[in-house]
Image: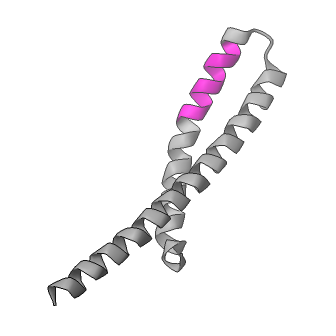
Amino acid sequence: MFQDMVLVVKSENKVKLKRTILKSITYRLICSTETLFISFGVARLMIEPSKQAWAITGILFCLKMVTYCVHEKVWDRFGGVI
């Protein structure tokens, strides 16, 4: 009986690890895409590099918190199929 419980725990840990890796990959892809578009957008609007850097940092600071929350909610809702 104890061995069966250990096998179940190991199996659940493998699923959690795969899910965690997949979540990390999807989150980084989304955030990298956001960074790319925000950087290009800000660069087109501003000329001074220091202002660009501060603008990009400020926008991404807020945007990535929202992205993380949305990403987690989506995974909570649809992550069970993976």
Vertically, is 74 above or below 1? above
Residue at the outermost bottom position: 1
Q: Nearer the viewer, residue 46 or 12?
A: 12
Q: Nearer the viewer, residue 37 or 11?
A: 11
Residue at the outermost left position: 2
When asked about the image quadrant of residue 59, the answer is top right
Residue at the outermost right position: 44
- Please identify the dominant SS of the magenta region: helix
Vertically, is 42 above or below 82? above
In which quadrant is the N terminus drawn? bottom left
- Identify the colour scheme used: one colour
Number of numbered discs: 0
**For residue 60: magenta?**
yes
Residue for point 58% across, 40% down: 63
List x then y, in percent, for residue 55. 65, 22
Question: Does residue 43 appear left or right of residue 10 in this picture?
Answer: right
When asked about the image quadrant of residue 12, the answer is bottom left
Residue at the outermost front position: 3
- Give, as a single range, the part of the protein colored magenta: 51-61
**For residue 22: magenta?**
no
Question: Does residue 73 appear left or right of residue 16 in this picture?
Answer: right
List x then y, in percent, for residue 9. 28, 76
List x then y, in percent, for residue 44. 84, 23
Residue for point 49% across, 53% down: 69
Question: Does residue 17 appear left or right of residue 66 in this picture?
Answer: left
Residue for point 66% across, 41% down: 32
Residue for point 46% across, 60% down: 20
